[in-house]
Amino acid sequence: MKFFIDTANLDQIREANELGILDGVTTNPSLMAKEGIKGKEAVMQHYKTICEMVDGPVSAEVLGTTYDEIIAEGKELVKIHKNIVVKVPMIKDGIKAIKWFTDNDIQTNCTLVFSAGQALLAAKAGATYVSPFIGRIDDSSWDGVQLIEQIVGLYNAQGFMTEVLAASIRNPLHIVRCAEAGADVCTCPLPSIMGLLKHPLTDIGLAQFLNDAKSMQ
Ligand code: G3P
């Protein structure tokens, strides 16, 4: 399973990248706004900076919702860097646009996916990635990981090449369960990635080893 970081914060991207386990980055308009980025030029420059930091796919989301707007924005975004993936919402015009991008060798990430039916349509249109939002599904008292399992099963049964990118990750257990479910990619906030490191017995064991090592000096 590939690890992407789900943020537009450059310090967090740098920290995850320095671990050596980062395969890519996803952003969305909320994450960009959180960093205080304003205006088209600043947005484009921010994507460029991220692409220069991480050697892997960087999802940049379109803001338009009509076919023409999505195509025009996608064309602009892919000019920024070869690693840009155009992130397109799961709407009717979004699916039409994903098909156009597929036919023109432009990578896409179909976002805001909450059902297997939506994932099926994204794959039919040739999306490179499909992003089910598992945390938001959990928030509505369904099991988001079950949706990952369903989509992985569906894609395997039908031989679709679209990669299942588990998004809206809220904790380290989500990451482990998505790996078990066969997700191709998990895009995670930094604290969830760092949470994978933690176990109190590791800390206790290390403290004991270091203490005992003193007697060897
Ligand atoms: O990037 C999309 C997704 O990961 C958003 O997560 O926490 O806002 O549901 P969240």
Image (tube, rainbow, N blue to C red):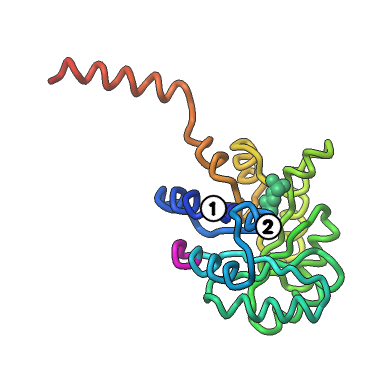
On the image, the x and y values in percent for residue 68 come to: 80, 81
- As shown in the figure, which amino acid type bears the numbered disc 1? Asn
Pick whichever of labels 1 and 2 is earlier in the sequence: 1
Is residue 167 visible in the rendered image? The answer is: no
Judge depth for marks 1 and 2 and give the one in front. 1
Residue found at the far bottom of this picture: 104
Question: Which quarter of the rendered picture does the C terminus lie within?
Answer: top left
Q: Is residue 54 above or below residue 202?
A: below
Q: Which residues are magenta?
A: 51-55
Q: Which residue is mark 2?
A: 164
As helix, strand or loop, the secondary structure at mark 2 comes to: strand
Front residue of this view, candidates 101 and 77? 77
Residue 129's tag is: none
- As shown in the figure, which amino acid type bears the numbered disc 2? Val
Is 89 magenta? The answer is no
Q: Main secondary structure of the magenta part?
A: helix
As helix, strand or loop, the secondary structure at mark 1 comes to: loop
Front residue of this view, candidates 27 and 3? 27
Q: Which residue lies at the image location 59% right of the left edge and 46% below the top edge?
A: 189
Q: Which residue lies at the image location 67% right of the left edge and 64% below the top edge?
A: 129
Q: How far apart in space, not on screen, are marks 1 and 2 (Cα)?
A: 24 Å
Indicate left or right for 20 with 138 as reference. left
Q: Quadrant of residue 35?
A: bottom right
Indicate left or right for 189 with 100 as reference. left
Q: Which residue is mark 1?
A: 9
Front residue of this view, candidates 119 and 85? 85
Indicate left or right for 25 with 137 as reference. left
Is residue 30 visible in the rendered image? The answer is: yes
Determine contact: label 1, label 2, CB under 8 Å: no
On the image, the x and y values in percent for residue 154 come to: 77, 57
